[in-house]
């Protein structure tokens, strides 16, 4: 078959041609995998940094809200202290005009209660102030961390953009070539190929026999099974890893995908 890949009736396509198409498709998608490997962990690193930056921004918003709430609470306590001081002055003045000891003692208890309220409010103000200071410190460190992460993100994005730009044309050509080959392969077989490839750790769905073993999992292949594979009369998968097996000479033909 020396013509470009094109859709044909399945009955017109030999098992050998199907195996060659699958092997060629594997070669092309493996080249795409190499390009993605070249990018390394950069896409994931960019995503992680974006997530971390979003989290830091949310934290800063929350801290700012918490500080506003603490500031409101401190002001409320200051107002409460003034109210208590006003009541103390009022009750002290009333003590000068009491008619008996019972009224004097009652006012004394009110004064004592308001003094306790003042002490409690002052205690709460100190606690709120300390908490506010801690949150402001947390804001400072979070802002520093955010700035650093944003710089890291800009750098990683630049690196990723440069690598992507360098490999973009090549990757697009390979993907177009893969699509052309895929159009030649029957849907059922293509689905099986993609399923095997997805489950394979190295992305290999089609492998050759190497040194009497599966090129994917390196399990030994019996001589008779090797002969069956070399005959290219049926599609044979490795009974250990499930990859499609082809003989080493399967690619010793003119590249019909060019």
Image (cartoon, helix red, strand yellow):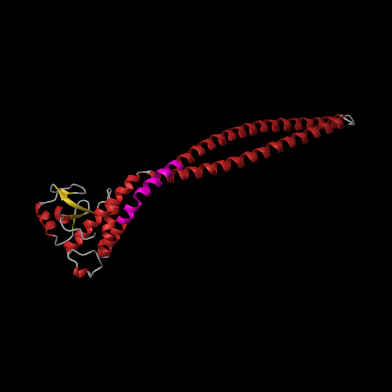
Q: Is residue 45 visible?
A: no
Horizontal arrangement in the rendering, residue 199 relative to residue 55 (left or right): left
Is 203 covered by the magenta stretch?
no
Give coordinates of residue 30: x percent, y percent.
Answer: 27, 51
Horizontal arrangement in the rendering, residue 182 relative to residue 253 (left or right): right
The residue that appears at 20% across and 58% down in the rendered structure is 255
Is 163 covered by the magenta stretch?
yes
Give coordinates of residue 130: x percent, y percent.
Answer: 62, 31
Looking at the picture, tell me which residue is in the foreground, 108 or 172. Answer: 172
Horizontal arrangement in the rendering, residue 105 relative to residue 175 (left or right): right
Magenta-highlighted stretch: main secondary structure?
A: helix
Name which quarter of the figure residue 195 lies in: bottom left
The residue that appears at 24% across and 55% down in the rendered structure is 26
The residue that appears at 76% across and 32% down in the rendered structure is 114
Looking at the picture, tell me which residue is in the foreground, 24 or 82. Answer: 24
Q: Is residue 80 above or below residue 46?
A: above
Horizontal arrangement in the rendering, residue 209 relative to residue 45 (left or right): left
Give coordinates of residue 85: x percent, y percent.
Answer: 79, 32
Give coordinates of residue 49: x percent, y percent.
Answer: 45, 43
Q: Is residue 11 above or below residue 43?
A: below
Q: Is residue 231 visible?
A: yes
The residue that appears at 28% across and 54% down in the rendered structure is 29
The magenta segment: 154-173
Name which quarter of the figure residue 247 lies in: bottom left
């Amino acid at each position: 078959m020396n013509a470009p890949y094109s859709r044909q009736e399945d009955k017109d396509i030999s098992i050998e041609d199907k195996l060659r198409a699958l092997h060629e498709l594997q070669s092309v998608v493996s080249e795409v995998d190499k390009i993605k490997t070249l990018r390394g962990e950069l896409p994931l690193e960019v995503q992680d940094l974006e997530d971390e930056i979003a989290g830091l921004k949310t934290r800063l918003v929350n801290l700012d809200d918490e500080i506003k709430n603490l500031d409101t609470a401190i002001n409320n306590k200051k107002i409460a202290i003034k109210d208590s001081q006003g009541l103390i002055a009022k009750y002290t003045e009333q003590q000068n005009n009491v008619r008996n000891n019972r009224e004097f003692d009652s006012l004394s208890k009110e004064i004592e209660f308001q003094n306790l309220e003042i002490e409690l409010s002052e205690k709460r103000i100190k606690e709120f102030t300390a908490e506010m200071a801690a949150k402001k410190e947390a804001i400072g460190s979070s802002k520093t961390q955010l700035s650093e992460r944003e710089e890291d993100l800009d750098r990683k994005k630049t690196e990723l953009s440069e690598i992507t730009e360098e490999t973009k044309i090549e990757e697009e050509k390979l993907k177009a070539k893969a699509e052309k080959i895929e159009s030649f392969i029957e849907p059922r077989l293509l689905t099986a190929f993609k399923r095997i490839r997805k489950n394979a750790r190295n992305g290999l769905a089609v492998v050759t026999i190497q040194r009497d073993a599966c090129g994917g999992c390196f399990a030994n292949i019996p001589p008779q099974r090797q002969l069956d594979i070399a005959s290219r009369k049926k599609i044979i998968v490795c009974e250990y890893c499930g990859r499609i097996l082809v003989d080493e000479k399967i690619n010793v033909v003119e590249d019909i995908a060019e």
